[in-house]
Image (cartoon, rainbow, N blue to C red):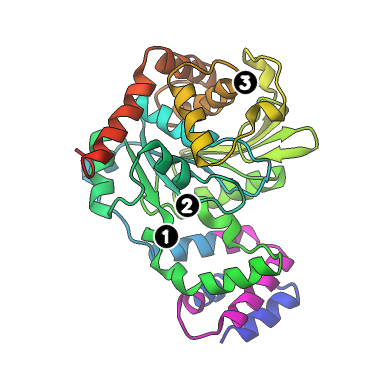
Amino acid sequence: MLTPLTEQLARREPLSPEQVRAAVALLASDQPSPQEKAAFLTRLAEKGETTSELTGFASELRKLSIQPDLDPTLRSREILDVCGTGGDRLNTFNISTTVALLAASGGVVVAKHGNRAITSASGSADVLEALGIRIDLSPAEAAAALAEHHFAFLFAPNYHPAFRNIAPARRLCAEAGQRTIFNLLGPLLNPVRPTVQLLGVPRPQLCEPFAHVLQSLGSRRAMVVCGSVGDAYLDELSTLGINTVAEFHHDRAFASSTFSPHDFPLSPATLQDLTGGDRHVNAAIVTAILSGKDRGPRREAVLLNASAALFLGGVTRSMSEGWDLAGKLIDSGKARSKLDDLVAASRGGGAR
C-alpha cells in the first residue's frame, strides 16, 4: 500500500502526480495503519516536498473537502483569504485575523479558513470565538455570511472530513517532533477556493514555491510573504525588517522581490511590541486596534498587512493606497462597526 511509496521517498525520489493521488487516497482511508502513514509522512518531510507534490496534495485534498455553494454573483467577485502557515513560533498576536476583519470592513469578501492554535497560544478560531464571532458555520451559513456580511470563518475540521483518518498519524509525527506536509498545507485548502490570497510562510525560501502552487491551483492573484525580524522570520509582512514577496496577478508575469517596511510611516518597534497572549488577551488587542484605541506598533503591523490585503482584493491600486484606506477604515469607525455586526449576527444564530 503506502510502503513502496515510503521506500521511494527514503531514496529521495519525488512522487509523480499519479503517486500523489494514490497517496492521498490511502492517507484519507482507514486501511493503512497510523504507523504506516506516519512513516510515509516522515520520509516525505525528510526528502523535502517539491512544488509538484505540494500542488498535488492540495488539489486532491481540496476535492475531498466540503465546499459551500456560493451564489454566482458572489462567485464572480474577488474572494480573499489571508492567513499564514504558522510555525514561526514568535508568538505575535493574531495579525492575519485582524487584517481579515479590517479588509471585510473595506468591502472585500473575506473567506477566512483556519483552526485552533497548534504552534501558538491563540489560533484564528480561538480569537474569533473569544471576540464572539461564530466559528461553527455550516456550508450554507458560511455562504450566506459571505453574501450578507462579506466575512465568514470556515473552521477547518468541519470542512475536511478526510482529516479524521489522517489525524492519528499526524499525532505520532508530532510526538516524535517531526513536522509533516500538513504543517504547510492549511492555507492552500480553503474550501471556498478564494480567488485572491495573502499567504504568509515562515521561511523566505518558501515564498516562490507557494506562489507557484497557488497559481497552479487557479488563484487569480496572490502574494506569498515572509517578513524578517533580526535572524528570525514572521509568516506575515514585517514592520521590523526586510520582507520577501512572491506574487502574481492574473496572466501577468510571476515576480519575486524584497522591500523595506520603512517606505511606510512607522514608529520604532521591537518584536516584543507585537507579542500576543491567549485568546482573551489577543481578542482585547484586536478590539483595541479595530476601535482605533491602539495606535502603536501593533496597529502599524496590521496596516502594513491590510495594505496588501486591500490591494489584492481590488479595493486599492497600490499598497500605499491600501495603508491609507486601512487607517481610514479604523478611524472612521467602519472597522469596529464590522466587528460589532459580525458579533451581533453570531448572537442571532448565524448570518442575517
Residue designated by label 3: 297
Examine the structure image and report whether residue 31 is included in the region drawn in magenta: yes
Please state which amino acid type lies under the numbered disc 2: Asn
- Furthest residue to the right? 231
Left or right for 181, reference 280: right
Residue designated by label 2: 115
Please state which amino acid type lies under the numbered disc 3: Pro
Element at label 3:
helix
Q: Quadrant of the C terminus?
A: top left
Residue 100 percent location from the top left of the image: 44, 34
Tell me whether the residue at label 2 lies in contact with that at label 1, contact meaning CB atoms closer than 8 angstroms: yes
Tell me whether the residue at label 2 lies in contact with that at label 3, contact meaning CB atoms closer than 8 angstroms: no
Q: Residues in magenta?
A: 25-54
Give the mark nearest the N terminus, 2 or 1: 2
Q: Main secondary structure of the magenta part?
A: helix
Left or right for 35, reference 82: right
Residue 183 percent location from the top left of the image: 60, 57
Examine the structure image and report whether residue 229 is included in the region drawn in magenta: no
Number of other residues with Cα within 10 Å of mark 1, as a class: few under 14, some 14 to 19, many 20 or more: some
Residue 203 visible in the snapshot: yes
In front of the other: 265 or 132: 132
Checking the image for residue 157, the label placed there is 1
The quadrant where residue 220 appears: top left
Element at label 1:
helix
Tell me whether the residue at label 3 lies in contact with that at label 1, contact meaning CB atoms closer than 8 angstroms: no
> At 47% across and 52% down in the image, what residue appears?
115
User: Distance of mark 2 from mark 3, alpha carbons?
Assistant: 26 Å
Residue 301 percent location from the top left of the image: 59, 25
> At 63% across and 73% down in the image, what residue appears?
172
